[in-house]
């Protein structure tokens, strides 16, 4: 990427600013266990730095950081850098044709983070524009039209962009089928038509055994303020499976001491979750507030351990957790060691204890139980239950086969 900037005659001072952003990105990836860069990793980094603010709310420096990440994502995915991609477009779907598209985006806004929602808007706009240019509506949309639309994507988009658009369009068409807004509302038909060109195998989540998790918790040095803070934060991730965004965003108003519960709206899904505040977790939070938290007037429970005090970034706990793992003698080679790994571990260990998937889904605050089923792929005990007995084959079978 730096070589590309130099060929485009960027000034040295400008390249220094790019590298400054990418240095922070590298720290974020290391702290959160990301081993390979992707656009999604870049979005996670920006959300952590900008607290998921709308683009219009960002400072000039923050907008510059968005461009630094965008060009890196372009080079990773496309091998080149698009010129008009810095400021997210204000996408609308005017007219009667656009009403189902607008409704879909409104529904997704309750489930998706701002960056994910923007991508959804951009991707389904391709179908909206195709229908508008063809003078058609969703009620007129046929398989023949779908084939022509996909052929257009093949010519206009790279393989990655094409498949991303197809994946989001599948979600959109599934929603339209449920509402009966298509000419043919058979969901399976549209899923067969809108196929990906590349088979994408989802990566298995990094997990740690219950013994390993307990060893990490026990290794945290609680004799100093940062240790008290990290201990309480790790417990929230390990016991409740809270995402790091929800942990660092936890406010005093989310703690209902009278009824011993935590109640918050998840930043990623917008779903409200209410969890019992155990004596262990509640005691750790109280110990931090009384003996570890700097006296600063902020609504957030957890703040920076060193001056200047302020709101925590997502990278803070990630780097500390890696240190506590090493102190516990845990070998994390080949596994991510960020706080999200504790969330994965909780789900997998609950599966191993034969907890029903809907119960685990409710604990983790998943939008659907389908997301939770991913963890069955790393639960060996559950996979054993799916294994079939090997049928008996008589020796005469082989005689007939080779005779």
Image (tube, grey):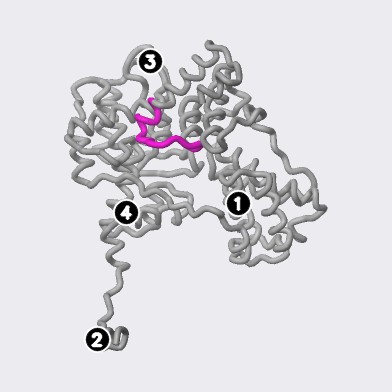
CB atoms of marks 1 and 2 within 8 Å: no
Query: In the image, which disc is placed on residue 394?
Result: 2
Q: Image point 33% across, 30% down: which residue?
A: 318
Q: Earlier in the sequence, mark 1 or mark 3?
A: 1
- Between the C-alphas of marks 1 and 3, the distance is 45 Å
Q: Earlier in the sequence, mark 3 or mark 2?
A: 3
Q: Earlier in the sequence, mark 1 or mark 2?
A: 1
Q: Earlier in the sequence, mark 4 or mark 1?
A: 1
**Residue corresponding to mark 4:** 378
Which of labels 1 and 3 is toward the front? Answer: 1
Check disc 2 and report its element: helix, strand or loop.
loop
Magenta segment, which residues? 27-40
**Residue corresponding to mark 1:** 166
Q: Is residue 101 depicted above or below 67 in this figure? A: below
- Between the C-alphas of marks 1 and 2, the distance is 49 Å
Asked if residue 39 is among those painted magenta in the image, a careful observer would answer yes
Residue 248: horizontal and vertical position, in percent? Answer: 39, 29
Q: Earlier in the sequence, mark 3 or mark 4?
A: 3
Query: In the image, which disc is placed on residue 309?
Result: 3
Residue 110: horizontal and vertical position, in percent? Answer: 56, 44
Check disc 3 and report its element: helix, strand or loop.
loop
User: Within the image, what quadrant is residue 357 found in?
Assistant: bottom left
């Amino acid at each position: 990427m730096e070589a590309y900037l130099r060929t485009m005659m960027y000034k040295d001072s400008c390249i220094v600013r790019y590298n400054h952003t990418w240095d922070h990105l590298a720290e974020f990836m290391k702290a959160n266990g990301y081993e390979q860069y992707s656009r999604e990793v870049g979005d996670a980094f920006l959300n952590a730095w900008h607290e998921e603010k709308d683009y219009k709310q960002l400072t000039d420096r923050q907008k510059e950081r968005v461009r630094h990440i965008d060009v890196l994502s372009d080079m990773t995915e496309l091998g080149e850098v698009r010129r008009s991609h810095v400021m997210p477009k204000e996408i609308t779907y005017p007219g009667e044709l656009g009403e189902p598209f607008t409704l879909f985006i409104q529904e997704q806004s309750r489930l998706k983070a701002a960056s994910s929602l923007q991508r959804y808007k951009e991707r389904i706009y391709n179908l909206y524009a195709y229908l508008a240019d063809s003078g058609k509506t969703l009620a007129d949309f046929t398989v023949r039209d779908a084939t022509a639309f996909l052929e257009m994507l093949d010519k206009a988009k790279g393989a990655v962009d094409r498949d991303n658009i197809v994946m989001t369009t599948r979600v959109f068409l599934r929603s339209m089928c449920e509402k009966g807004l298509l000419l043919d509302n058979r969901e399976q038909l549209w899923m067969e038509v809108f196929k990906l060109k590349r088979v994408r195998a989802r990566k298995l989540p990094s997990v740690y055994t219950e013994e390993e998790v307990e060893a990490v918790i026990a290794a945290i040095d609680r004799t100093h303020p940062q240790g008290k803070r990290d201990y309480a934060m790790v417990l929230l991730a390990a016991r409740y499976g809270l995402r790091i965004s929800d942990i660092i965003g936890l406010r005093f108003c989310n703690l209902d001491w009278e009824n011993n519960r935590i109640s918050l709206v998840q930043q990623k899904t917008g779903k409200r979750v209410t969890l019992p505040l155990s004596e262990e977790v509640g005691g750790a939070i109280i110990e931090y507030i009384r003996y570890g938290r700097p006296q600063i007037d902020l609504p957030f429970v957890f703040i920076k351990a060193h001056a200047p005090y302020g709101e925590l970034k997502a990278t803070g706990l990630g780097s500390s957790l890696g240190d506590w793992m090493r102190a516990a003698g845990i070998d994390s080679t080949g596994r991510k060691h960020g706080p999200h790994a504790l969330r994965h571990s909780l789900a997998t260990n609950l599966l191993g204890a034969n907890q029903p998937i809907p119960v685990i889904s409710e604990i983790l605050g998943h939008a659907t139980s389908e997301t939770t089923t991913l963890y069955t792929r790393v639960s060996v005990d559950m996979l054993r239950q799916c294994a079939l007995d090997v049928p008996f084959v008589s020796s005469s079978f082989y005689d007939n086969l080779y005779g």
